[in-house]
Amino acid sequence: MPPKIRGMTSNLTPNSSGLPRFTLMLSGEDALDLDASQSAPPKGLPQEHFLLGPHLPLAPVLLLGQSELTLDPTQMIACLQPVHLHATRDHLILMHQDQIDLTEQESARLLQIALPLLEEDFGHKPLYQGRLDWFIPAGPFSSLATHSILGIAKLWRKLQNEVQMLWHIDPVNEERAQRGLPAMNSLWISGIGKLEDLQTPSLFQHITHIYGESPLLPGLAKYLGIPHQDQVEISKLDSAFAWVSKPESLWPELQNALINGRISEIALIDFPDGKMRQRIVTAKDLYKKSWAFWKQSDPISWQELIASQNR
């Protein structure tokens, strides 16, 4: 039976011992049930709130990671993305960007078509164009954070519809259809915020390396002045933070690091029901409890560790 991991808390446990610690964050989902005080679904995912703070300035953090621009920390910035919306009988499906296979040339052409409309309604030129993300000062859309169909939301829908019509008749989408690829049929806006509103968790005061593939991490690391790389470097686990897509593949190496004393503990951060929780895992927590006390039991698997979280 896996042991109950200590430190089940909604607050961060500081590393006051000074012993080598590795911090591993797991992705979370929105809570299914709204609090009584909430009239709309929460903005952003729980891990985004944890990393960036309540204002969620996603766009400037993404821009910081994708470019070499020097950002005005007081400027409100929006992220625009060409997307494919698939309409079914009773709902819309927003296709993940990993599935659209958009080329640099197609992205540049789509932006060129939409540019006059964007500059007119935003009142600014784009700051930076990536393949999947375009960044522009938010201008009149700075307050666009509503489920209302009126006000600034109405202005956004007007712009969105005009861009959709232009893209619908453009050869870019005709060529994509011939290659069996989804049409770029809509424009998505998200992440509106300014860099000065970024509030990072206190644990980063003691972090020396940031690992993970999330597009948020390069910009966050640059802002904090901490080295970042996609893949975890096993020789540099002490005082490191990781948010990786497949933590289960990392678990055997982390077990070995605990057993061999390269690190003394793992701070495991997750988000049950959308709320942050941290637990501390040490070498003594790695083994299953057994009535045969004279025999060393097997170390717990990743699945057993995760199962113990839900108790």
Image: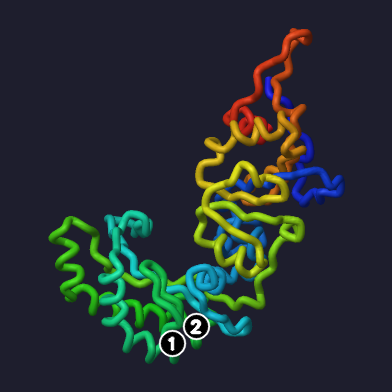
Q: Is residue 115 above or below residue 247?
A: below
- Splitting the image into 4 quarters, where does residue 97 fall? bottom left
- Asked whether residue 32 is in view, the answer is no
Q: Is residue 38 left or right of residue 261?
A: left
Give residue 282's position: percent from left, percent from top.
Answer: 75, 34
**Circle 2 Cα neighbour tier, 10 Å, few/some/many (<14 / 14–19 / ≥20):** many
Residue 138 badge: 2
Question: Where's the C terminus, which quadrant?
Answer: top right
Q: Quadrant of the N terminus?
A: top right
Residue visible at 80% across and 48% down in the picture? 13
Question: Residue shown at 20%/71% (left/top)?
Answer: 172
**What's the residue type where badge 1 is placed?**
Phe
Secondary structure under badge 2? loop
Residue type at numbered disc 2: Ala
- In space, the residues marked 1 and 2 are separated at their CA atoms by 6 Å
Q: Is residue 147 left or right of residue 158?
A: right
Provide the residue designation for mark 1: 122
Q: How is the model colour-coded? A: rainbow
Asked where in the image residue 302 lies, by quadrant, the reply is top right
Of the image marks 1 and 2, the number of the one nearer the N terminus: 1
Q: Residue at x 53, y 68 (%)?
A: 65
| Residue 66 place in picture, x, y as percent | 48, 69
Looking at the rendered structure, the secondary structure element under dot 1 is: helix
Q: How many marks?
A: 2
Marks 2 and 1: in contact by CB < 8 Å? yes
Q: Residues within 10 Å of mark 1 (few under 14, many from 20)?
A: some
**Which residue corresponds to the image point at 38% horizontal and 67% vertical from the top-left?**
132
Vertical placement of residue 196 versus 45, above or below: below
Residue 309 in the image: above or below residue 215: above
The label shown at residue 162 is: none
Residue 238 visible, this angle: yes
Lateral position of residue 99 relative to residue 198, left or right: left
